[in-house]
Image: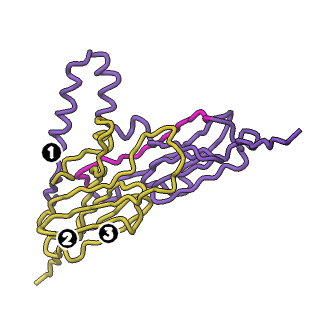
Chain colours: A yellow, B purple
Amino acid sequence: MSILTRDRNETSNDKPGYPVRTVAPLVDVFENAEEVLVVADVPGVGVDGVDVRVENGTLTLQAKHPSRQEQSGPALAREYDEVDRARSFRIPDGIDTGRISAEARNGTVLVRLPKVAAVKPRKIDVRAS
Amino acid sequence: MTTAWRDLSDALRTFDFINRHAEFVFDDWPGLALERWPRLRSAARAAWPAVNVFETKEAFVYKAEVPGLAEGDVGVHVEDDALLLRGERKSDVPEGYTVHLRERGPIAFARKFPLPGRVDAEGVSASLKDGVLTVTLPKAKDALPRQIAVKAG
């Protein structure tokens, strides 16, 4: 549960010397007639580091930041920490959980949650009798 | 029809916000109004992008977190002993979608960093990977440490 209580990078800045390893990513959530679309910022994390899980009606995004050992020189300035990110959402009714898909692109993750056919608006043709 | 969308961590995040906000109540008002409030409201926008700077033997390395940016969205310039990052993250609501939650808005940015030492402007390189911009500025040749051989006289 603790991963869900962390809020962005500033939390770690509030307590110097007490690094927070996992923070909640910033997200957008959009919806249209076909799907719910979740977009999360996970800078530094590629497709290999992203984990999207659907469990007990909950969608969990996790992004593991690759460790950056090659940066051997001292930091002259540090405005951000290279952290893991995680956030969970309750999946609303009417989502076809079997068809949820995810895509990593330029340090963001897009998760598409398609609606089940019955929830989509449908136009009924009216015939003359 | 709009689906009920719930962020599980919302209540906890709100509590966190109140918690941090409460600390500032005891600050003087001008400080609260001018400095604290914008930082709280949008930490991401206060200084975007966030940048880490490293020094290696041969170069200064600037890393910036720019999630959502593609090549062409960011310009890197070196002028007058300063590094200039300028660009725009377009983040429009996709056509025909309604908004449930909007935390990553569009951002136009320009940041200027005075360089910590002399660099070889011709040799500067920049790359963009997984939303992280890395700018490598090689140190000027005559600024590199040099070993002087001591000869027996």
User: Under tag 3, what secondary structure?
Assistant: strand
Q: Which residues are magenta?
A: B98-116
Residue wearing tag 1: B12
Above-or-below relation of B97 to B86 = below
Above-or-below relation of A93 to B72 = below
Q: Left or right: where does residue B147 sit relative to residue A45? A: right
Residue wearing tag 2: A115
> Mark 3: which amino acid?
Ala
Chain to which the residue tagged by mark 1 belongs: B
Q: Quadrant of the C terminus of chain B?
A: top right
Separation of residues labelled 2 and 3 (CA atoms): 15 Å
Q: Label 1: how many residues lie within 10 Å, few (<14), some (14-19) or many (20+)?
A: some
Residue wearing tag 3: A102
> Mark 2: which amino acid?
Lys
Q: Earlier in the sequence, mark 2 or mark 3?
A: 3
> Mark 1: which amino acid?
Leu
Q: Label 2: how many residues lie within 10 Å, few (<14), some (14-19) or many (20+)?
A: many
Residue B15, image quadrant: top left
Given residues A109 and A17, the one toward you in this image is A17
Q: Residue at x 17, y 47 (%)?
A: B10
